[in-house]
Image (spheres, rainbow, N blue to C red):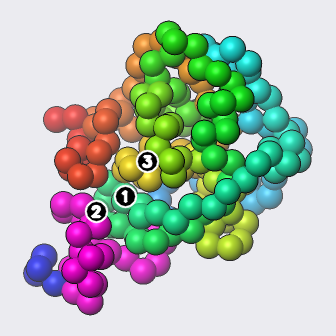
Amino acid sequence: MGIFRNRGLTDEQKRRIPPGQHHVSDFPVLHVGEVPYTEVPPGWDLRVYGRVASPLRLDHAELRALPSAGVVCDIHCVTSWSKLDTRWEGVPMSWVLEAVQPQPTATHVIAHAEEGFTANVPVEALHDPNAMLAYRYDGAELAPEHGGPLRLLLPRLYLWKSAKWLRALEFVDADAPGYWERLGYSNTADPWKEERYAF
């Protein structure tokens, strides 16, 4: 049955589907707990702090006034679905890195989201040209169920690393496993190596 999972795709599209994945045309909704809010709550802000030369704290209006860009990329969920040619808009991570100037001792970044959710990545993951602070998807405001008003986008990794309802990026000098990593998911999460679980 698996040989039919990506039927209808071109050969070029099939080459973009990592091992063990199947293509979907919709955008499945998966997350821990409930959607925390349906509109930007009063007092919402984003912090970028830790081992950086210039910490940032931005309210929603300040965030939306920053330089923005669009990317088209493929995304891959650890539950085995992939979606091709997704369109996102937001603040390029290259701008964030230039603004905060991570210190040489910063090796990892902890993404802090609502409800205490965290996801950890090496600093170099933020240098992916498609990495961004995303607030629009497919030409519209990012829906709450997909992480609006703001989510991290790191499309080279399984999608749980792209934390929804993002509230902070903390640059640290030692790795600290996030929510799913503590429950046995892979620390590195490379879809092309099928790094789904730590065991």
Q: Which residue is mark 2?
A: 80
Decide: few, some or many residues near mark 2? Use Cα within 10 Å; few <14, some 14-19, many ≥20.
some
Q: Residue at point 56% right, 68% down?
A: 87
- Residue 178 visible in image: no
Q: Nearer the viewer, residue 129 or 141?
A: 129
Residue that protrudes farthest toward the bottom in the picture:
8
Circle 1 is placed at which residue position? 77
Q: Is residue 93 above or below residue 123?
A: below
Q: CA distance from mark 2 to mark 3?
A: 12 Å
Q: Secondary structure at mark 1?
A: loop
Q: Looking at the rendered structure, which numbered label has been put on residue 16?
A: none
Left or right of 143? Residue 25 is left
Instruction: Name the amino acid type tagged 1.
Output: Cys
The span shown in magenta is: 5-28
Tag 2 near tag 3, CB within 8 Å = no
Query: Residue at the location (27% across, 67% down)?
Result: 17
Q: Which quarter of the figure has residue 34?
A: bottom right
For the residues labelled 3 and 1, the Cα–Cα distance comes to 7 Å
Q: Which mark is residue 160?
A: 3
Q: Position of residue 2 (x, y in %)?
A: 13, 76
In the picture provided, is 98 more to the left or to the right than 42?
A: left
- The residue sitting at 41% across, 19% down in the picture is 175
Q: Is residue 21 magenta?
A: yes
Instruction: Classify mark 2: helix, strand or loop.
Output: loop
Give the amino acid type for the residue marked by disc 2 in the picture. Answer: Ser
Q: Quadrant of the N terminus?
A: bottom left
Name the chief secondary structure element in magenta: loop
Precedes in sequence: disc 2 or disc 3: 2
Q: Are marks 2 and 1 in contact (CB under 8 Å)?
A: yes
Taking 94 as reference, is 129 left or right? left
Vertical position of residue 132 compared to residue 144: above or below? above
